[in-house]
Image: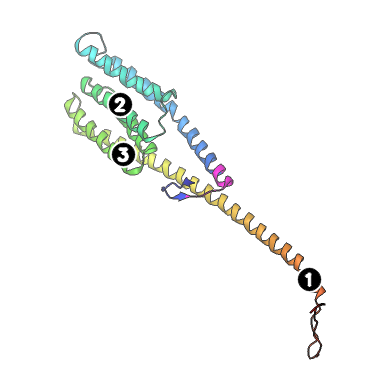
Amino acid sequence: MTDLPDGTPLAVSPRPTAALAGVRDRRERRGRRLRPLLWGVLAAVAVQSMYAEPRPGVQGVHLAVAVVLAGCLLSLAAVASGLWQVVKPVSGVAFCLSVTGFGLALGVLQSGSMSVLPPSVAVLTAFLVLRRRQAVLLGSVVMAGLVAAAFAGADGGVANTLSRLLFCVVLALMAISMQQAGDHEERAKLLLAQLEDAREAEAEAAALAERTRIAQDPARRARPDPVPGSPFRYRPRGG
């Protein structure tokens, strides 16, 4: 048994199973291609935080910035390097919450930092990994936290906050498009594999019917048909 993209259970033969495995492998390869994006986000956050105020340090608020920045960068690096596999709902939610929490805390402590990037990555990951309702719920929580952190920080202007929210919405729509494309590809591969199975079963049924007809022909030739209007009818011996 396997599941279609909408969750409908479906019994499959080896051919559809192989097609489904190939589609999932291609989807995983597409996911691995997003890892350079995480490295870029990590580099942008790290460089910008080094020049924003207050800078990371070992005392007071500087220490808090250093701890929050380290947590954010470690979360991004773990997923970007493949050490943290974000392929299941539990791991996806854990990564989204962790990177969002560190990113929002960084935005509150530092002004002018790239704190919008970690929550944006969380929104993108949620809509790629989780089901639609779960992704919408988690994305709403992330965006609500982004609004609260923006107004609690030093750069919480309305225009700045709206631009951050719009950026998250664009990423969510992009993730939905990618997810739908993968679902359609998976369904098409399954349908093609099932069509091949149906054609093969039809060919086997036709061959079996032909063999049955050929096997029945000698018996028909051994029993001559009665002549129309003749009083004599064929009667087998011993009858």
What residue appears at the point 47 percent right and 30 percent down from the top-left corner?
Answer: 32
- Marks 3 and 1 close (CB-CB < 8 Å): no
Q: Please, what secondary structure does the residue beneath circle 2 have?
A: helix
Can you tell which quarter of the image residue 139 is in?
top left
Residue 33 appears left or right of 132: right
What residue appears at the point 35 percent right and 36 percent down from the top-left corner?
Answer: 126
Q: Which mark is residue 138?
A: none
Q: Nearer the viewer, mark 2 or mark 1?
A: 1
> Where in the figure is residue 217, as x and y percent of width and height?
78, 69
Within 10 Å of disc 3 (Cα), the crowding (few <14, some 14-19, many 20+) is some
Q: Which mark is residue 169?
A: 3
Q: Please, what secondary structure does the residue beneath circle 3 have?
A: helix
Q: CA distance from mark 2 to mark 3?
A: 20 Å
- Does the magenta portion include 197? no
**Which residue in the protein does label 2 denote?**
98
Bounds of the magenta segment: 10-18
Q: Earlier in the sequence, mark 3 or mark 1?
A: 3
Please state which of residues 68 and 191 is positioned toward the viewer in this rendering.
191
Which of the image's four quarters has the C terminus?
bottom right
Q: Please, what secondary structure does the residue beneath circle 1 have?
A: helix
**Which residue in the protein does label 1 denote?**
219
Q: Can you see residue 160?
A: no
> Where in the figure is residue 107, as x and y percent of width and height?
24, 24
Q: Nearer the viewer, mark 2 or mark 3?
A: 2
Q: Earlier in the sequence, mark 2 or mark 1?
A: 2
> Where in the figure is residue 111, as x and y percent of width and height?
22, 21
Residue 132 appears left or right of 200: left
- Does the magenta portion include 11? yes
Please state which of residues 69 and 83 is positioned toward the viewer in this rendering.
83
Q: Is residue 45 above or below residue 198?
A: above
What residue appears at the point 21 percent right and 23 percent down from the top-left corner?
Answer: 108
Q: CA distance from mark 2 to mark 1?
A: 79 Å
